[in-house]
Image (cartoon, rainbow, N blue to C red):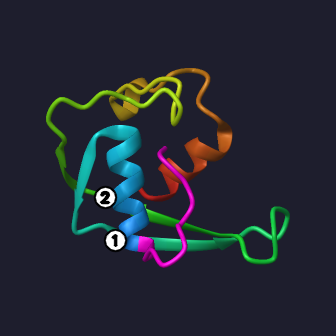
Amino acid sequence: MPGGGVEVGESCLRALQRELEEEAGMIPIDPILKSIYYNSVVSKRDHVLLFLVDNWALKANFTANRKEISDGKWFDLDKLPKDVAKDTLCQIKEFL
């Protein structure tokens, strides 16, 4: 799942749009904020926002930035890779 930080002066929605475009070549349409998690282990100011993006467009000629991600692929939900992290699976199942 794409992720990243919010830059100074950037809205959470704009950060979502930027990260999806950078890491997945996706342009989200009407994303929905589903939950907010507070991660006190990382810092007193670390909050994780989880969005549901049911509708999107794919960016033409997308090439993954290897400084951002090592690999990117699309999978059917019933054919996910066997090495998907347990936390990621829990988040996926929570919203389906």
Question: From the viewer's perspective, is 7 left or right of 74?
Answer: right
Question: x%, y% of residue 43?
Answer: 81, 69
Q: Report the amino acid beneath label 1.
A: Ile
> Looking at the image, how many numbered discs can be counted on the residues?
2
The answer to the question of whether label 1 and label 2 lie on touching residues, with beta carbons closer than 8 A, is yes
Q: Is residue 11 above or below residue 84?
A: below
Residue 53's tag is 2
The dominant secondary structure in magenta is: loop
Classify residue 82 as left or right of residue 62: right
Label number found at residue 32:
1
The residue positioned 50% from the left and 22% from the top of the image is 81
Q: Which residues are magenta?
A: 1-12
Residue at 71% across, 70% down: 46
Kind of element beneath mark 2 = loop
Residue 43 appears left or right of 30: right
**Label 1: which secondary element:** strand
Left or right side of 74 for 40: right
Which percent across, then down, holds residue 71? 47, 23
Count neighbours of disc 2 (C-alpha within 10 A) and say few if under 14, some if 14 to 19, many if 20 or more: some
